[in-house]
Image (cartoon, grey):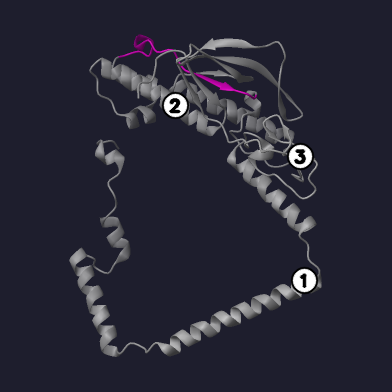
């Protein structure tokens, strides 16, 4: 697939979108080098970065006439889900996380030139009837942890290619209230959907486009809340459950014992025949009996070896 050299936009903000922007830059550079008759592998380019790789070839990035792609992010740099933070993080922990985010972005931009545009959300598309030609973006701000659009800040940008690297959001369901792009819940902690006493939402359906860790953490929290507050059983209920489980286990044990009694055990000769067949198959496969040594001797060929890259 041909990657254009200008007006390329990536919509995201998480770690996956950083991988996407890196892949885009690598592909752009490799395309330009191929146009010049230069063969260069992606692994070496990914490891060394664009400037260092081009320097070895006696080429500058500017000479390739590539306009760095732009990563558009709804949140601020400080809110990008790139660094995990504990609950109730201290001011020092937050400052350290912010410094890590900035360092991560700066290092990536040094190796793979791209532009970062924070606090922008795509709200509409521009097309010529047959293809996408641009995006309508709007500035955002963070209010109590939620991303809100700023009225009157719409702007239009030209695009030749748009790549989305965003988390999943719930599909609207008839009768289920929505609040923006997520389900309308009474509160974040319970996940209880408004106007429904026994219907709950969890993960991205409540947290929005977040990182996987955040969504899994929320899912676990809501599940525990439901079990503790809505599925609690009294002593009599637990007794019935254990009694039913005991009967089920007893039935299974009896079935296993009956199966064993009905099947005659193998004779010594039959066991020896099976072992001999196993030994013959192992010998034909060249297996010595040392499993660890076998694994080391039969490792699949790695891509680095295939392209003669160490």
Q: Nearer the viewer, mark 2 or mark 1?
A: 1
Residue 63: in magenta span: yes
The image quadrant of residue 79 is top right
**Residue extending furthest toward the front:** 174
| Magenta segment includes 123 | no
Q: Position of residue 194 (x, y in %)?
A: 79, 40
Tag 1 or tag 3, which sits nearer the N-term? 3
Secondary structure of the residue carrying numbered label 2: helix
| Residue located beneath label 3 in the image | 185
Sooner in the amino-acid sequence: mark 3 or mark 2:
2
Residue drawn at point x = 57 percent, y = 34 percent = 167
Number of on-image labels: 3
What distance separates the C-alpha of mark 3 from that of mark 1? 31 Å
Q: Position of residue 132 (x, y in %)?
A: 48, 16
- The residue under the point 75% across, 52% down is 225
Q: Residues within 10 Å of mark 2 (few under 14, many from 20)?
A: many
Look at the numbered disc 3 and give the secondary structure of its residue: loop
What distance separates the C-alpha of mark 2 from that of mark 1?
56 Å
The residue that label 2 is drawn on is 22
* Crowd around label 1: few <14 · some 14–19 · many ≥20 (10 Å): few
Residues under numbered marks 2 and 1 in contact, where contact means CB atoms less than 8 Å apart = no
Asked whether, in this view, residue 113 is left or right of residue 147, the answer is: left
From the top left corner, tell me how far across and down residue 157 is, in percent: 54, 11
Magenta segment boundaries in residue numbering: 59-75
Q: Is residue 120 above or below residue 179?
A: above
Give above or below for 28 relative to 65. Answer: below
Q: Quadrant of the N terminus?
A: top left
Question: What residue do we see at 76% from left, 60% from top?
Answer: 231
Q: Nearer the viewer, mark 3 or mark 2?
A: 3
Tell whether label 1 touches label 3 (CB within 8 Å): no
Q: Position of residue 114 (x, y in %)?
A: 48, 19
Residue with the mark numbered 1: 237
């Amino acid at each position: 697939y041909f990657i254009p050299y200008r007006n390329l936009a990536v919509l995201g903000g998480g770690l996956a979108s950083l991988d996407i922007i890196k892949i885009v830059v690598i592909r752009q550079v490799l395309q330009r080098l191929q146009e010049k008759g230069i063969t260069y592998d992606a692994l070496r380019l990914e490891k060394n970065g664009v400037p260092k790789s081009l320097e070895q070839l006696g080429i500058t990035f500017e000479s390739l006439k590539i306009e760095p792609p732009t990563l558009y992010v709804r949140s601020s740099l400080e809110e990008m889900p790139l660094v995990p933070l504990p609950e109730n993080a201290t001011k020092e922990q937050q400052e350290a996380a912010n410094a890590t985010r900035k360092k991560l972005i700066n290092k990536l931009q040094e190796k793979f030139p791209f532009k970062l545009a924070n606090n922008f959300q795509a709200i509409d598309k521009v097309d010529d009837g047959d293809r996408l030609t641009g995006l309508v973006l709007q500035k955002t701000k963070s209010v109590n942890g939620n991303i809100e659009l700023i009225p009157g800040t719409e702007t239009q940008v030209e695009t030749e290619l748009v790549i989305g690297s965003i988390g999943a959001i719930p599909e609207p369901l008839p009768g289920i209230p929505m609040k923006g792009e997520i389900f309308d819940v009474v509160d974040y902690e319970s996940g209880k959907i408004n106007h429904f006493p026994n219907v709950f939402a969890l993960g991205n359906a409540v947290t929005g486009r977040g990182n996987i860790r955040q969504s899994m953490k929320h899912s676990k929290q809501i599940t525990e809340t439901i079990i503790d507050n809505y599925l609690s059983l009294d002593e009599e209920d637990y007794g019935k459950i254990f009694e039913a489980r005991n009967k089920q286990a007893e039935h299974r044990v009896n079935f296993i014992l009956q199966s064993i009694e009905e099947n005659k055990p193998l004779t010594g000769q039959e066991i020896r025949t099976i072992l001999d067949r196993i030994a013959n198959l192992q010998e034909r496969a060249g297996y010595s009996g040392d499993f660890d040594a076998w694994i080391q001797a039969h490792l699949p060929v790695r891509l680095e070896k295939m392209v003669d890259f160490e």
